[in-house]
Image (cartoon, rainbow, N blue to C red):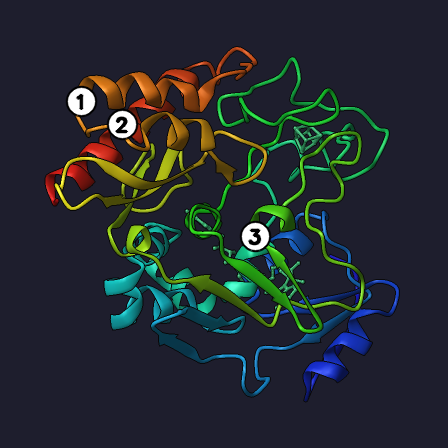
Amino acid sequence: MRDFSYVRANSVDAARRAAALPGAMLLAGGTTLVDLAKCGVAEPETLVDIAHLKGLDSIEVNEHGATIGALCRMSHVADHADIKSRFPAVSEALWQAASAQIRNMATIGGNLMQRTRCPYFRDPGNFSACNKREPGSGCSAIGGVTRGHAVLGASDACIAMYPGDLAVALVAFDAKVHLDERQLSVDNFFLLPGTTPNKEHAIEPGEMITAIEIPGSVAARRSTYLKIRDRQSFEFAAASAAVGIEFEADGRTIRDLRVALGGVATKPWRARTVEDALKGKVLEPGAVHAASLLAVKGAVDYGANHYKIELAPRVVARAILKLGETA
Ligand code: FAD
Ligand code: SF4
């Protein structure tokens, strides 16, 4: 870890100005950034501490939706009564993310900005080839150990999986990221690797996340987040699904369906093909299992991650059927 200077920002403007300087990085809860600095992936010249900024740690919920400040802690949002009742998938995604200690430190803005857990990316001392870290250097994962890598959205340059949980629920419910002066859908905020895997987010130097906004909907109210992982205490997803559903008055025909996948793609992955296949249909297990297979249409495995192609549709189907039981 090399020396760096430390600046404590006292306003959003001051933070943005400081963050625009070459080599500067924002510091919120520090649960990702400190790790990345220790392993030599992040080498900030200046850390701009935003953790104490006023006005970015509130949660407002009304009939239109929720606005959540970027500095809200994950645990605060997960446990908020209105988030639990109106956006259960968001609360559940946060509860199943990381450990209690990390959730108490980590912020919502930092969560959206977390980097991949690809072990080659995080080990520059032993693996120099990583296009995400060093554009043009190659990819150590292709032909290497791929159990945790993506089967959807990968490119020849990078197959790293997007590891977060919250953003999967946000993508399912058309949430937006507020970057102070502009807003972007969460879906467009995350970028596919293509030929530039080093650029993961549509955020420019000098911009910072100030809030996220989630529109209210019936489907968001009847929603869930199902995460399958190697251990329950804390672990990133092997495959996960955020699902929300709205029924017609008969309580069986699907009027609206939202499905997004985690743990399997290079970004939070909205599965519109599954949604379109089931909208207007009566919810029954055969149709749900058949439609859920569409979630991985076009998936490509790299050997050890093949299991994700079988697991993901089962996770999607189980989540949809679980919501059907509560109809
Ligand atoms: P920081 O570490 O402070 O910052 C992270 C990055 O975000 C930095 O690049 C920083 O510059 C940038 N940043 C921070 N705030 C802003 C802002 N407002 N605007 C723009 N950029 C900003 N996550 C999951 O979703 N699921 C898991 O299962 C999970 N398991 C984990 C297990 C472990 C052991 C650890 C260490 C982490 C795990 N995480 C998991 C990731 C965790 O959620 C993130 O570390 C955390 O959310 C980051 O938030 P932070 O406030 O600590 O960010
Ligand atoms: Fe780097 Fe992406 Fe290859 Fe991992 S998968 S080594 S992050 S280029």
Q: Quadrant of residue 80?
A: bottom left
Residue 306 in the image: above or below residue 152: above
> Is residue 8 among the parts visible in the rendering?
no
Which label was assigned to residue 285?
Answer: 1
Percent from the top left, x then y, of residue 282?
19, 29
Q: Secondary structure at mark 1?
A: helix
Residue type (three-letter) at the residue carrying disc 3? Val
Closer to the N terminus: mark 3 or mark 2?
3
Write down the quadrant of residue 285 in the picture: top left
Give the side of residue 172 with respect to residue 38, left or right. Answer: left
The residue tagged 3 is 186
Which quarter of the figure is the C terminus placed in? top left
> Which of 125/250 is in front?
250
- Report helix, strand or loop for mark 3: helix
- The answer to whether mark 2 and mark 1 are in CB contact below 8 A is yes
Q: Amino acid at mark 2?
A: Ala
Taking the spot 26% from the left edge, 24% from the top edge, the residue there is 288
| Separation (CA) of disc 3 from disc 1 | 31 Å
**What's the distance in space between the residues labelled 2 and 1, CA to CA?**
8 Å
